[in-house]
Image (cartoon, rainbow, N blue to C red):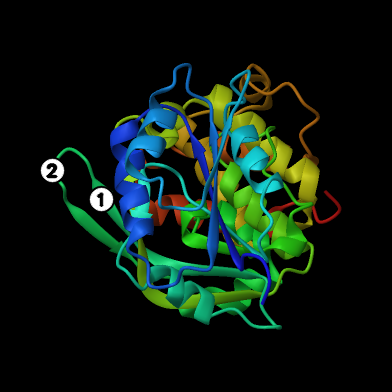
């Protein structure tokens, strides 16, 4: 088959040590029909020097961004330059778990699949602790029926755990989002008919450190609340008829300890739907000292769900 089957897209920003680890994991792959697209947001030439001095044998196309694009635009830039049939984005702090990782990904491709993802292993920088994450297969049917379930929990993993058919390149990572940018992308793919397949193997090591976006924005209402609203605005409030999605929004407000529309609008001054207003009123009626109790919170959420405005 002419051309490259897989485009490995690496959006970079500094951190040559982790990039070297990733490129070394690519160099040993048994599947070799790939190109590497490397888009560099770094302010200096250290990434280029690394590529030229140690990885000249790899089919790397290096692009230096004149002005730093940031995430996720640097991700989108790399993907836009790809010429392969399949897009394999790899963040520079992640790497392939073994020499057959890319082969195992490609073996899962077929005419009936567009969106492939795998199990993965988190590797924590501070102590090199490893934590395996396996996709709960029993949730696949529900996920396909309601992709917004990913807002309750991202059970797919980060973008490095995916392989996407290039015909879906028109769907990009939305820069409206910071924390939820990956799950919003997955929701968008599924809403647009991408056919999903799971590889039940741990193919990717995901580097976990203090600099992770989650650590910077979690439990910060100025980040969490606008993104919660934008998800509802983009995909509709009908998803709140699914109790797990409803619960995900309940837990967002509960964890932020914000129980009124006035408080919410300090951070996200938008026209929140009536169903959210009702949810906040129900939260305000709860005993705040008991909301930390999982059983109490679930019971009150369920009662709120049953009373929710059906016409939103």
On screen, residue 137 versus residue 247, left or right, reads: left
- In the rendered view, tell whether residue 109 sits above or below residue 125: below
Quadrant in which residue 116 is drawn: bottom right
Query: The residue tagged with tag 2: helix, strand or loop?
Result: loop
Quadrant in which residue 202 is drawn: bottom left
Q: CA distance from mark 2 to mark 1?
A: 9 Å
List x then y, in percent, for residue 122: 30, 54
Can residue 275 be spotted in the picture? no
Instruction: Kindly indicate whether the residue at mark 1 contacts the one at mark 2 (C-beta within 8 angstroms).
Output: no
Residue extending furthest right?
A: 311
Query: The residue tagged with tag 1: helix, strand or loop?
Result: strand
List x then y, in percent, for residue 242: 67, 63
List x then y, in percent, for residue 120: 36, 63
Q: Which residue is mark 1?
A: 123
List x then y, in percent, for residue 171: 75, 51
- In the rendered view, tell whether residue 166 sits above or below residue 113: above
Q: Which residue is nearer to you in this view: 124 or 93?
A: 93
Can residue 301 be spotted in the picture? yes
Residue at 68% x, 33% y: name it. Answer: 175
Q: Which residue is mark 2?
A: 127
Residue at 79% x, 52% y: name it. Answer: 170
Q: Which residue is nearer to you in this view: 56 or 278?
A: 56
Residue at 53% x, 68% y: name it. Answer: 33
């Amino acid at each position: 088959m002419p051309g490259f089957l897989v485009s490995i897209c690496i959006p970079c920003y500094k951190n040559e040590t982790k990039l070297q680890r990733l490129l070394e994991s690519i160099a040993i792959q048994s599947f070799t029909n790939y190109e590497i697209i490397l888009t560099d947001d770094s302010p200096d030439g250290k990434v280029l020097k690394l590529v030229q001095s140690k990885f000249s044998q790899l089919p790397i196309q290096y692009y230096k961004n004149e002005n730093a694009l940031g995430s996720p635009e640097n991700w989108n830039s790399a993907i836009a330059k790809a010429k392969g049939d399949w897009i394999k984005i790899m963040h520079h702090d992640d790497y392939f778990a073994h020499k057959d990782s890319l082969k195992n990904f490609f073996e899962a491709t077929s005419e009936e699949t567009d969106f492939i993802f795998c199990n993965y292993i988190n590797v924590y920088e501070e102590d090199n602790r490893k934590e395996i994450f396996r996709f709960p297969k029993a949730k696949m049917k529900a996920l396909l029926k309601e992709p917004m379930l990913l807002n309750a929990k991202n059970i797919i993993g980060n973008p490095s755990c995916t392989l996407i058919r290039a015909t879906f390149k028109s769907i990009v990572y939305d820069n409206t989002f910071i924390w939820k940018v990956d799950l919003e992308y997955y929701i968008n793919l599924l809403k647009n008919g991408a056919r999903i397949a799971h590889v039940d193997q741990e193919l990717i090591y995901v580097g976990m450190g203090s600099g992770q976006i989650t650590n910077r924005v979690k439990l910060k209402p100025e980040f969490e609340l606008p993104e919660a609203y934008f998800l509802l605005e983009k995909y509709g409030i009908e998803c709140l008829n699914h109790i797990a999605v409803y619960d995900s929004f309940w837990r967002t407000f509960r964890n932020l300890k914000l129980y009124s529309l006035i408080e919410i609008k300090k951070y996200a001054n938008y026209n929140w739907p009536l169903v959210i207003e009702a949810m906040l009123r129900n939260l305000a009626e709860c005993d705040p000292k008991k909301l930390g109790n999982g059983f109490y919170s679930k019971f009150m959420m369920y009662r709120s769900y049953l009373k929710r405005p059906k016409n939103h």
